[in-house]
Image: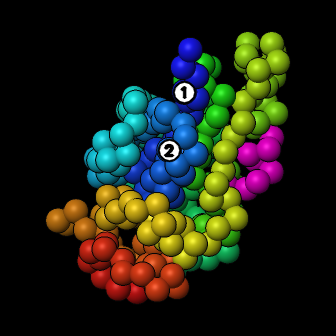
Amino acid sequence: MAQKQKKAIVLLSGGLDSMVSAAIAREQGFDVIALTVDYNQRHKIELKSAQRIAETLGVIEHIILPLDLSRFGGSALTDDINVPKSGVSDDIPVTYVPARNLIFLSLTLGLAEARDARDIFIGVNALDYSGYPDCRPEFIQGFEKLADLATKAGDQGSGFTIQTPLQYLTKADIAKETERLEIDPGLSWSCYDPSPGDLHCGLCDSCRLRQKGFEEAGLIDPTVYAQQP
């Protein structure tokens, strides 16, 4: 009797980190189910990127789930607040979406239990990031414990593992992973505030970190930026 293929749920935003995380899940032998949350962010380009990535990686299912976080507001990504363009700071920026990864992981956990998957992949990173508290290892560890308490599967002893393969990688390391995994980083989208013509702005935190990563990795960045810092 053929062995049943193991499944993993990957939170796929359409960004570089989530693309690499999904490719690593595939490399580890998982059948990948991708969940993309359309949270009514200020642009839809990353949703198109998520679709392209899902098709390229050959996921077995891709769900784009609508969830209108603009009703909550409180972030430059969901509200009428300007996206900072002056450079990456040490403070939590206004691009932080209140409790976003907690909300998204809760949705991903529900899908994992429904699909009988026990591994969840999320592309959080604790080194080259913009200071978001929901990217920290402590948050991931806490959620993994919560997942076992909050689910039937966990209650019955079949717990969940939150996989964070990029947790301690720099952006340069992540850029190098695209080369090792033979995936096209040009499929991904990072910009918080796209310029006309669907170009990366080049000046927001996410664009700056992306450019810095490819530069430090010594790799060609296929991204077209409207401006350079």
Nearer to us of marks 2 and 1 is 1
Query: Horizontal placement of 58 versus 139: left or right?
Result: left
Helix, strand or loop under label 2: helix
Q: Is residue 42 above or below residue 196?
A: above
Q: Amino acid at mark 1?
A: Gln
The residue that mark 2 highlights is 26
The residue that mark 1 highlights is 5
Q: Residue at x 62, y 72 (%)?
A: 170
User: Residue 201, located in which quarter of the rendered image?
Assistant: bottom left
Q: Nearer the viewer, residue 129 or 25?
A: 25
Q: Residue at x 58, y 45 (%)?
A: 28
Neighbour class for label 1 at 10 Å: few (<14), some, many (≥20)? few
Q: CA gap, disc 2 to disc 1?
A: 12 Å
Neighbour class for label 2 at 10 Å: few (<14), some, many (≥20)? some
Q: Is residue 101 above or below residue 216?
A: above
Q: Give the main secondary structure, helix, strand or loop, of the magenta stretch.
A: helix
Q: Is residue 81 visible?
A: no
